[in-house]
Amino acid sequence: MNPWLRLFGKAFEFIVLLFSRPRLALYFIVIVLGVGGVGVWIPLFQLKYGGHIGLIDVYRSFATYAIAIAVTAFAEFLLRNKDELTLMMFAFGLTLVGAVPAVVILVQDSTMLAATCTEISIFATLWLWFIALADRPEFEEGDARTTLGD
């Protein structure tokens, strides 16, 4: 198979998996975005309901969330895909695209720049999470009776 087709197939495979595996979709929404993003949700609520927090602080919360997702997803990817060097380079590039803008958010005070960096960073890190974890067998739907021993 053409190496470019394999790369793009793997990079965008998560779209099909997300819609064909409800367990994956629920895990992503409830655990990764909901529970994992608590450090982002709290500052958002504080900002909305008059807490003593600025917009830049919310962007910084997104930045730390993006760095945490990027680093752990890339580490997971490395452990599972040691032999796929092309995909590994792509994943490393996504890690950089996710982490570098997040670091920029943390070291500057411009909310306009922070907004742009947040969008880039969150998009790249969540895409990396899907590439690293979406094809895990734990997210496959099996026969419900198999857990009962039938």
Image (cartoon, helix red, strand yellow):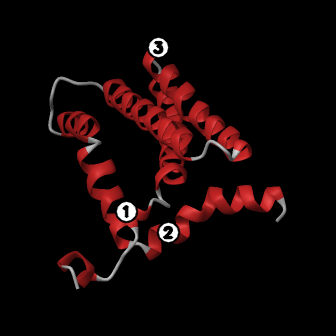
- Give the Cα distance between marks 1 and 2: 12 Å
Dot placed on the residue nearer the N-terminal end, 1 or 2:
2
| For the residues bearing labels 1 and 2, Cβ distance under 8 angstroms | no
Determine the residue positioned at 48% across, 27% down. 102
Q: Position of residue 109 (x, y in %)?
A: 44, 16
Q: Position of residue 80 (x, y in %)?
A: 53, 46
| For the residues bearing labels 3 and 2, Cβ distance under 8 angstroms | no
Res. 45 in view: yes
Residue that protrudes farthest toward the front in the picture: 149
In this rendered view, identify the residue nearer to me: 10 or 100: 10
- Secondary structure beneath disc 3? helix
Which quarter of the figure is the C terminus placed in? bottom left
Residue type, mark 1 in image = Glu
In this rendered view, identify the residue nearer to me: 80 or 117: 80
Please say if 97 is above or below 136.
above
Locate residue 39: give its quadrant: top left
- Residue under label 2: 17
- Residue under label 1: 138
Dot placed on the residue nearer the N-terminal end, 1 or 3:
3
Dot placed on the residue nearer the N-terminal end, 3 or 2:
2
Residue type, mark 2 in image = Leu
In this rendered view, identify the residue nearer to me: 1 or 106: 1
Determine the residue positioned at 74% across, 60% down. 6
- Give the Cα distance between marks 3 and 2: 36 Å
Q: Position of residue 13 (x, y in %)?
A: 59, 64
Residue type, mark 3 in image = Val
- Secondary structure beneath disc 1? helix
- Residue under label 3: 107
